[in-house]
């Protein structure tokens, strides 16, 4: 199986970039690709034909980009990520090729509306949340910057579950995203690679050298599916290569020969399970065997792919670090480290030391969390059963590393125990973050505060040992998808103000700053917001039958449901406002009208998160229907928040809720999208909020809550949530309303677990931050009443958020970690 995937000498020409050229190809795709006439074509036929037509315009650029990168012998980024939350592809491809108008017109001439076909696309939800979406933003930026990158990951048959609500409670449905066809992918079954599992190891004599070989037990095929990653109007297209598991022939036949037909088919199902479904936990891995299988499966495929097929045949692997940097997106792909060692030592027969020297230069590690429960650990028992050779290699890496530490710190056994890659308690296990830190050339956090905490609190011994290994790269988001595509009205206004270059040079937004003081510009800016609210209103009506009241502040909290993110604190605010109205402290006729919009999926096994979803929906049902409020407060919670919904929701928002407990949200990226789209943030001093506030200015950001050191002190002193409840009457009333069954038909038991948890444990200090949060929300109401002042702040938020482009993140990675320059035109 040689690499026939990219044919350097093939000449491919794009269809003509005209309405006629497009229509001709579209009709060809309909008949030759879909086998239907225009008259008989379903919307899905039309969508598939359109996608394939647009693909044609990208094809020449793709082949050319790869060819050019090969010729330049350029160093590539191999981004190893178990998740890519891509969002819909059609619009992005149209933008990259600048074809939107041609296609719109061409389709219209056939009586087809482009929007109808856009809506036909199911987004590939191959990720949980921020971490997966970040990977998608990064590959977009690298393509736009002409930097060689292959994104490696898993082609899950089922992505993140589709969320529905039954009586306000979350019920999950499978996400069958491939059901109606997958026009953006290029499968290459002929280029499948074999991955081994299980068995044992044995040593043998190799011409006087003792070597080890892995006598594996079973195997599975990895079939690559390629996806185009188009740069923004720069003629470049990089590759995303996702692996799909298929049973090997050998595996089948072994059993089949014994006549056990049903068993043989079952075995196939077993192998193919590996890429069947995305684990729906964000930040809380479960340590399941299938997950380790997934992790090893995709990194083994990816390393083999790069070494055997992407690199030229005669390539000297001692020079591997000149050609590749494997970026480990959190700990999920860290098993790649012992895998590369295994390839070099067992298969290529290198010395351990030379293999280790090369390996250390080929990896870098990004940590995306601070939650201790999110730091992956695999039991030695499981690792030894599934990947016996890798466990041995990890042991040896650890042994040599600890010997080195011991030499520098003689007698400090406690230090050795703390730094060991192998934990002894509660059970013997492999600490993947430590392995990544020992092996990686660099370790980075994802926002300034997070990187400091990572260095000082999570990995203090390692940062003391290797101070230069640790660095920060603050996250970013792609302005193509999250401004240019998702907010056309604002994009037009920005272009009017600062010219077109901002889409690839987001710091140019700074040019808008003076316009914050321009009355006419502010009016235009408000018109954009109003338009975006209209657009959201239309969508929610059609999507969920939700009616949005007009003239209300849109207060949005969208992110995964997790206790540390504190959706409960948001609910306590809503209940407090409700209570104030019922007590006559607020007059619904004069108070600030608000719509509270939520979007959040809970991991299916995370019961408390599901309680909180139930609570939001029940509070909403009660408040929305209560005539005493006169429609002043409305709670909406459209189900199944995803990238597609975010694209309409975020541009409409006035207020962005970023209220995690300080020190818990590594960065956040939704926070950046809101600021860039002109929402003001109410937020804690956490993650990238810190940098947002520094950039937009204190006057244009609502800060509240304990600071991280204060949190640490309070927890150390023994936090007692009950005291806050007893001492703040408004808080007590809000909690009591929930506890008494006000939102659950008089049945106080429904939310008893949640209330109980808040009053006795409250791990994330919601009650401690309640007063500060409510006061900040009162400041928000006052500020919003000043229409001109608010608009001014919103404009300044946009103008000063250029730093949060993922292009800037990529330049930082290139500069500090990767050293992979762009491949410029010949
Ligand atoms: C996360 C963090 O929770 C989030 O703060 C961060 O923005 C994101 C990307 O760096 O990574 N870590 C995990 S795990 N899931 C995330 O979304």
Image: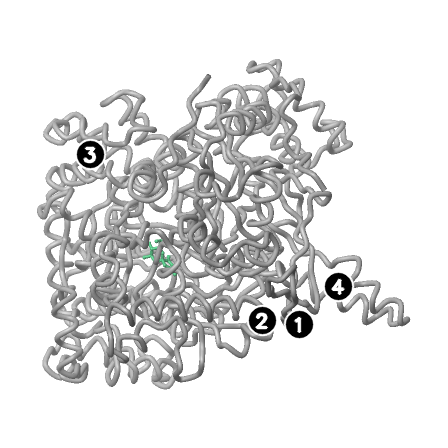
Work out whether residue 466 or residue 633 is closer to the camera in this orientation and state it.
466
Where is ligand 1, by quadrant? bottom left
Q: Which of marks 1 and 3 is nearer the N terminus?
A: 1
Mark 4 vs mark 2: in front: 2
Q: Name the residue under label 2.
A: 388
Q: Where is residue 631 in the image (x, y as percent from the top left)?
A: 28, 57
Q: Quick check: 376 above or below 86?
A: below
Which numbered mark, 1 or 3, is in the foreground of this view? 1
Check contact, mark 4 vs mark 2: CB within 8 A.
no
Mark 1 and mark 2: Cα distance apart in space: 7 Å
Q: Residues within 10 Å of mark 4 (few under 14, many from 20)?
A: some
For label 3, the residue is 799
Query: Which dot marks residue 268?
Result: 4
Cβ–Cβ below 8 Å for labels 1 and 2? yes
| CA separation in Å, label 4 and label 3 | 55 Å
Corner quadrant of residue 271: bottom right
Sooner in the amino-acid sequence: mark 1 or mark 2: 1
């Amino acid at each position: 199986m040689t690499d026939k995937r990219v044919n350097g000498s093939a000449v491919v020409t794009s269809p003509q970039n005209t309405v006629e050229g497009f229509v001709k190809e579209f009709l060809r795709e309909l008949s030759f690709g879909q086998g239907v006439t225009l008259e008989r074509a379903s919307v899905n036929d039309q969508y598939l034909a359109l996608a394939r037509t647009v693909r044609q315009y990208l094809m020449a650029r793709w082949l050319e980009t790869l060819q050019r990168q090969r010729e330049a012998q350029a160093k590539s980024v191999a981004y190893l990520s178990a998740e890519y939350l891509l969002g819909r592809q059609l619009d992005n491809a149209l933008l990259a090729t600048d074809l939107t108008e041609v296609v719109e017109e061409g389709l219209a001439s056939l009586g087809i509306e482009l929007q109808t076909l856009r809506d036909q696309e199911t987004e590939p939800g191959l990720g949980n949340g921020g971490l997966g979406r970040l990977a998608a933003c990064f590959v977009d930026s690298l393509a736009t910057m002409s930097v060689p990158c292959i994104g490696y990951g898993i082609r899950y048959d089922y992505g993140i579950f589709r969320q529905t609500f039954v009586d306000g409670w979350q019920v999950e449905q499978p996400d069958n995203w491939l059901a109606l066809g997958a026009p953006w992918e290029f499968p290459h079954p002929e280029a499948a690679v074999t991955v081994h599992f299980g068995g044992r190891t044995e040593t043998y004599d190799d011409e006087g050298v003792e070597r080890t070989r892995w006598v594996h037990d079973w195997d599975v095929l990895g079939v690559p599916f390629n996806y185009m990653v188009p740069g923004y109007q720069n003629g470049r297209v990089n590759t995303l290569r996702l692996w799909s598991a298929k049973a090997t022939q050998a595996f089948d036949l072994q059993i089949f020969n014994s006549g056990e037909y049903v068993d043989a088919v079952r075995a196939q199902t077993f192998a193919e399970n590996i890429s069947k479904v995305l684990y729906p936990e964000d930040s809380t891995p479960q340590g399941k065997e299938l997950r380790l299988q997934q992790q090893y499966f995709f990194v083994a495929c990816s390393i083999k792919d790069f070494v055997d097929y992407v690199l030229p045949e005669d390539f000297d692997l001692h020079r591997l670090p000149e050609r590749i940097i494997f970026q480990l997106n959190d700990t999920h792909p860290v098993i790649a480290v012992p895998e590369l060692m295994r390839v070099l030592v067992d298969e290529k027969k290198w010395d351990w030391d030379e293999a280790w020297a090369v390996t250390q230069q080929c990896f870098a590690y990004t940590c995306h969390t601070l939650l201790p429960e999110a730091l992956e650990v695999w039991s030695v028992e499981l690792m030894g059963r599934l990947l016996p050779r890798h466990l041995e290699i990890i042991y040896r890496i650890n042994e040599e590393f600890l010997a080195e530490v011991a030499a520098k710190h003689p007698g400090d056994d406690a230090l050795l125990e703390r730094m060991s890659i192998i934990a002894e308690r509660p059970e013997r296990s492999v600490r993947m973050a430590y392995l990544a830190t020992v092996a990686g050339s660099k370790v980075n956090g994802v926002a300034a505060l997070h990187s400091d905490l990572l260095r000082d609190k999570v990995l203090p011994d390692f940062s003391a040992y290797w101070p230069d290994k640790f660095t920060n790269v603050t996250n970013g988001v792609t302005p193509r998808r999250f401004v240019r595509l998702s907010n056309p009205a604002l994009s037009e206004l920005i272009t009017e103000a600062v010219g077109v270059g901002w889409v690839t040079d987001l710091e140019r937004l700074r040019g808008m700053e003076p316009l914050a003081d321009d009355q006419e510009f502010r009016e235009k800016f408000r018109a954009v917001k109003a338009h975006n609210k209209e657009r959201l209103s239309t969508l929610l009506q059609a999507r969920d039958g939700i009616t949005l009241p007009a003239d209300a502040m849109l207060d949005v909290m969208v992110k995964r449901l997790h206790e540390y993110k504190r959706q409960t604190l948001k609910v306590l605010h809503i209940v407090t406002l409700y209570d104030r109205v019922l007590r006559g402290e607020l007059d619904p006729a004069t108070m600030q009208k608000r719509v509270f919009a939520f979007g959040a999926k809970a991991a299916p096994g995370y019961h408390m998160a599901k309680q909180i979803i139930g609570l939001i929906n029940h509070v909403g049902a009660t408040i929305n229907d209560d005539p005493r409020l006169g429609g002043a407060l409305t709670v909406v919670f459209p189900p199944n928040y995803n990238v597609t919904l975010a694209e309409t929701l975020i541009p409409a928002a006035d207020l962005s809720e970023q209220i995690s407990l300080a020190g818990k949200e590594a960065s956040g990226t939704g926070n950046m999208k809101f600021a860039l789209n002109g929402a003001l943030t109410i937020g804690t001093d956490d993650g990238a909020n810190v940098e947002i506030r520094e950039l937009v200015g204190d006057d244009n950001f609502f800060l509240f809550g304990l600071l991280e050191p204060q949190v640490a002190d309070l927890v150390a002193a023994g936090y007692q949530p009950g005291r806050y409840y007893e001492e703040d009457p408004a808080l007590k009333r809000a909690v009591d309303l929930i506890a008494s069954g006000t939102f659950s038909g008089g049945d106080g038991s429904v939310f008893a677990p949640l209330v109980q948890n808040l009053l006795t444990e409250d791990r994330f200090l919601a009650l401690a931050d309640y007063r500060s949060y409510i006061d900040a929300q009162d400041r928000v109401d006052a500020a919003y009443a000043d229409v001109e002042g608010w608009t001014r702040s919103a404009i300044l938020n946009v103008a000063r958020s250029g730093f949060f482009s993922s292009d800037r993140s990529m330049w930082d990675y290139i500069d500090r970690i990767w050293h992979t320059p762009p491949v410029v035109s010949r």
